Amino acid sequence: MLKRLRESKSFRGTLLASPAMLWMIILLIIPLVLILITSFGGRDPDGNVIYGFKLDNYIRLTGYTENCTGIGDYFGGLIEAIANPAAYEDIQVAATKCFDPLYLQILWRSILLAFETTLIVILLGYPLAYYIARSSARRRNTLLFLVLVPLWTNFVIRVYAWIIILRGQGVLNSVLVTLTSLLGLPFQPLDLYPSPGAVLVGMVYEFLPFMILPMYTTLEKIAPSMYEAAADLGARPFRTFLRVTLPLSMPGVVAGTILVFVPVMGTFVVSDILGGKNLVLVGNLIQRQFLDARDPAFGSAASIILMAMTLAVTVYYTRRFGFGEEIASA
Amino acid sequence: MQGHAIELRDVVKQFPGTTRGSDPVLAVDHVTLQIRDGEFFSLLGPSGCGKTTTLRMIAGFEMPTAGEIYIHNRPIGYTPPYQRPVNTVFQHYALFPHMTVGQNVAFGLEMKKVAREDIHKRVGEALDLVRLPGMRDRMPKQLSGGQQQRVALARALVNHPEVLLLDEPLGALDLKLRKEMQLELKQLQERVGITFIYVTHDQEEALTMSDRIAVMDHGKALQVGTSLEIYEAPNCRFVADFIGETNFISGKVSSLNGADAEFEADGLKMVASVEAGVTPGAQATLAVRPERIVLSDTRPEDTPNAYLAEVIEIVYVGNDTRFRVQLAPTITLSVRRQNVLPVGMPALHGPGGKRVWVSWHPGSARVLVS
């Protein structure tokens, strides 16, 4: 019996996987279950969690307030907020409305930023990954090394570096001032920091390597004979790219997208440092609920919603484009 | 006028050194070839001889450093591959893994913007031609090596190229399948009538399939000829050595008599055929194939090349028996005899030591000067 167990392949596989599985159970699954339980609870005046099963936190995230008389009222408010956001600018007026746009705005802003970041990172990363993959072996190593060098510095410090570049009297403005004065043009220093644009720049900068590496890996695996075969059959370089290179490198793009989109959705450091106090993303919302507002139950609910959204996008995306196992290793 | 499908005039290809500071590599060294329309032409040579580079220059994947390549008398040396009327069957097939068999075969026609219905019809015909009907919707990785090979052939032939280039297309197949595919390729070529240029390092493959062969070494085309010419009348030591098995005897030409030469080595006189341009007194090598040497107990009457020799070794290898015989202190030859009789000649089995007559016909030996 024991011998058969020892010889069984699946048992050996389980044995090999068990340290990682144990790690995941203790540090991921259990905390996740705790977060899920907490998210249905509430908060007492001292900031302690009252466990229970109430959907209040989730309802609050949708923007449904006590002013609402029913679901129709809520959707009316939602449509009004989208059609005429100005109506919600006055805090006094907004307090009397049924719909509270705050949290949905935060979620929408986070998703939009994650999409923008991912798209820019793909557009910047693909040509570079392609160039590295088609370079000579010696040059390839140097270039990959250069891509990875920034990762040696702490994440937060790298974000702070962008303040020095983007602020009022920062590097970028100084350079522009010098240039324009040399040319005799009038110049007002640009108001670049803090701003949503600065957050986007910071995100793109932080996550570019995570897109380049998987893209490079798949592009490098494409045999040169693939390009030659396409050219041999009459395809000009651009058609070769569309019909052969791009489809064969999709697994790398998909992997890179997941590596970038998922963390960008949850990060709060970049928006905290470069976005100023008014730019709140889901990550910041969750962080503030746990630390400043001392409402872990609401923070947990926001975490669950963040995870659900990220999962939904990821699942849709991988279903749509696939991980590409079937075409990997040509 | 019978045109040349492909003509190479003094083509040179030089690659930069692989590591910094190393010398450039001369991959193809002033090659001039004329390949006739409808011919099955092989480029044969050891690895690194420049045969693949030559093919790649015809395909357009490499540009010649010097010289010019003509396809049906049009110079094409510097046009990109996608504008050339040639197609290639790659060594490892290079099928597009993300496309079905049908999409792979259709690719070239789509690039030429052939009408959709025509594409469908021609893809079907091409798959029938390579005996893969009904495989249209399979993915390449679902096929065996031999089937992938056929898809690669169909993908190239469907475009009706003026010349089909094949880069060791059978190299990845096992021996039995390779033999089958050799015959099939040859039949296919005769059926479609397209000029084939076939790169191989396998001399038997080249001899079996080709109308003509160019033997290459160190970037040079050493000899161009039919299988018969290459095997029976090699023009240099490399060709004689590379194609089949050969005994070489070093010596010098003592006199000439028409197409025959009298050759002297280690005190023995031999008569052999010789190329024009050889002068008496030149240092030379005599090449004679092991299967052309006859062993006998009595001196044969019909040839001047008969020598009493000592049998050093006898090895039985099934269909053949191989002997090693020593004619003179510096001349040891290997002899191959087909085992036509059930048990061969009992007297000649054993460790050797017996003295026998070794002989060959003057037409079976050839004097080479380079």
Image (cartoon, rainbow, N blue to C red):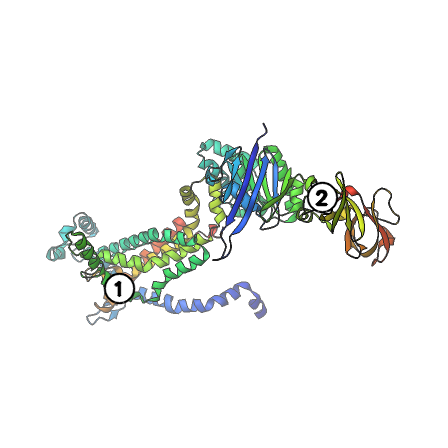
Percent across and percent down for residue B6 are 55, 36
Percent across and percent down for residue B108 are 48, 38
Task: Give the secondary structure at mark 2.
Answer: loop
Is residue A237 shown above or below A214?
A: above
Contact (Cβ within 8 Å) of mark 1 with mark 2: no
Protein chain holding label 1: A
Res. A161 mark: 1
State the residue lying farthest toward the left. A92
Res. B279 mark: 2
* Amino acid at dot 2: Thr
Q: Is residue A306 visible?
A: no
Closest to the observer, B15 or A223: B15
The residue sitting at 32% across, 51% down in the picture is A119
* Amino acid at dot 1: Ala
Task: Please state if A75 lies on the left or on the right of B275 as rendered.
Answer: left
Mark 1 Cα-neighbour bin, 10 Å: few <14, some 14–19, many ≥20: few
Is residue A137 shown above or below B156?
A: below
The residue sitting at 37% across, 62% down in the picture is A148
Task: Please state if B88 lies on the left or on the right of A296 as rendered.
Answer: right
Task: Give the secondary structure at mark 1.
Answer: helix
Q: Indicate the quadrant containing the N terminus of chain B: top left, top right, bottom left or bottom right.
A: top right
Percent across and percent down for residue A229 are 49, 43
Percent across and percent down for residue B264 are 78, 49
Mark 2 Cα-neighbour bin, 10 Å: few <14, some 14–19, many ≥20: few
Instruction: State the CA–CA distance, disc 1 to disc 2.
Output: 84 Å
The residue sitting at 37% across, 66% down in the picture is A28
- Judged by depth in the image, the label closer to the viewer, 1 or 2, is 2
Closest to the observer, B134 or B70: B70
Are discs 1 and 2 located on one and the same chain?
A: no
Closest to the observer, B281 or A13: B281
Closest to the observer, A133 or A7: A133
